[in-house]
Image (tube, rainbow, N blue to C red):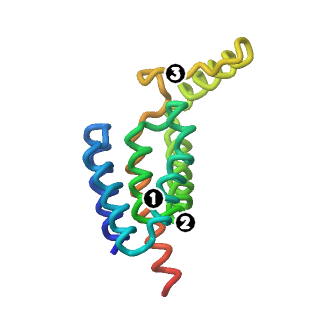
Amino acid sequence: MTNVLVGGLLTIAAWFDWRHRKIPNTLTFSAIVLGFCYQWHTGSLWTSLSGVMGAFLLAAIPVASKGMGMGDLKLLMAIGAWSGWAEVYPLFLHSIVLCILFVLLYPRRWSRLGKNLFVMAVGWTAHRQLWLPGVEKTAFAFPYAVFLLGAFLLRQMLHKVGAA
């Protein structure tokens, strides 16, 4: 049952992220609260807490470095509230792999990525500060919720193939 709910949550979030580049707080916060309530009702509140805290720790650095938005962080925490750390960690890793594959298969942005990495390296070398590009100059601005949904669907297919 939780897989259906998490899949629905990710589908709605991916749609909002794709169309509006923003995931509504009402969606993520209500999913976190309902996930806590569901896990408390089943006697697995610690599973929910570990998922939320683990998701926060995983995404804190990408959010701080402007690699992810706060909506992406809250979405990952909502998934953690429903499924726990044991599902959040591999889902996060698989979504990052999908993002990296997308970057490698999208060569039109490689020059901008190279310039951004060069500016970051110069800033660190000269001033010991990371100079992060603004949103308008980022090499890649894509909806992370779509990749999270892709990783979720990929994991579901692999589970079904492994079970057969």
Between circles 1 and 3, the one closer to the viewer is 1
Which residue type does callout 3 highlight? Pro
Task: Identify which residue is drawn at 54% across, 50% down.
Answer: 96
Closer-to-camera residue (118/26)? 26
Residue beneath disc 2: 86
| Secondary structure state at the residue bearing disc 1 | helix
Number of residues whose C-alpha sits closer than 10 Å to that of mark 2, classed few (under 14), some (14–19) or many (20 or more): few
Give coordinates of residue 140: x percent, y percent: 47, 33
Asked if the residues shown at circle 1 and circle 3 are in contact, with their CB atoms under 8 angstroms apart, the answer is: no
Which quadrant of the rendered structure holds the N terminus? bottom left
Give coordinates of residue 55: x percent, y percent: 50, 51
Number of residues whose C-alpha sits closer than 10 Å to that of mark 3, classed few (under 14), some (14–19) or many (20 or more): some
Asked if the residues shown at circle 2 and circle 1 are in contact, with their CB atoms under 8 angstroms apart, the answer is: no
Which residue type does callout 2 highlight? Ala
Return the residue found at the far top: 126
| Secondary structure state at the residue bearing disc 2 | helix
Which residue type does callout 1 highlight? Gly
Task: Identify which residue is drawn at 27% across, 54% down.
Answer: 12
Alpha carbon separation for disc pair 1 and 3: 30 Å
Residue beneath disc 1: 80
Q: Is residue 138 left or right of residue 21?
A: right
Residue beneath disc 3: 133
Give coordinates of residue 157: x percent, y percent: 44, 73
Q: Is residue 138 left or right of residue 131?
A: left
